Image: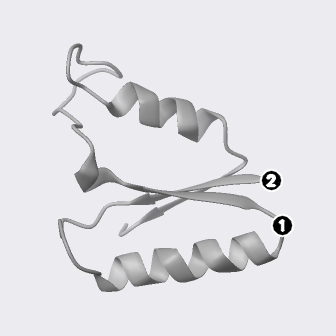
Amino acid sequence: MKAIILLGTHKMSGLSNTETLCEFLSGRMRRQGSRAEIVKLVDYSVLPWRCSDMGKGDEWPGIVEKILGSEIIFATPI
C-alpha cells in the first residue's frame, strides 16, 4: 500500500512535535509493508488558491498527484 503524510507544520527548520509524529507514523507504516512518503508542505511553493492549479510556480498540482496515487492519506496538524 502507498501512503502519503501531509505535514502542515509552519516550522521551516528543526524538528517540530508534528514532524516527530509523522516520522514515527511513517516508520510504523513501513514496518507493516506500506510505502510511506512525508510531504512537508512548507518546503513547497503552494500558492493561495481558488482552484487546483494557480499556474507557474504553483507546486500544489504535483502534491495532488501524489495524493491521488495513494491508498492512505494522513494530514496533520488538523
Q: Which mark is residue 1?
A: 2
Q: Tag 2: residue type?
A: Met
**Nearer to me, 48 or 24:** 24
Q: Position of residue 60 (x, y in %)?
A: 34, 32
Judged from the image, the secondary structure of the residue bearing numbered disc 2 is: loop
> In this picture, is 43 found above or below 59?
below
Horizontal relation, residue 40 to residue 34: left or right: left
At x 37% / y 66%, what residue is drawn?
78
At x 23% / y 79%, what residue is drawn?
14
Residue 58, quarter of the rendered image = top left
At x 27% / y 67%, what residue is drawn?
9
Q: Position of residue 45 (x, y in %)?
A: 21, 37
Q: Measure the C-alpha gap from mark 2 to mark 1.
A: 7 Å
> In this picture, is 9 found above or below 44?
below
Q: Position of residue 42 (x, y in %)?
A: 23, 54
At x 61% / y 71%, what residue is drawn?
26
Query: Which residue corresponds to mark 1?
Result: 33
Horizontal relation, residue 73 to residue 49: left or right: right
> Residue most toward the front?
14
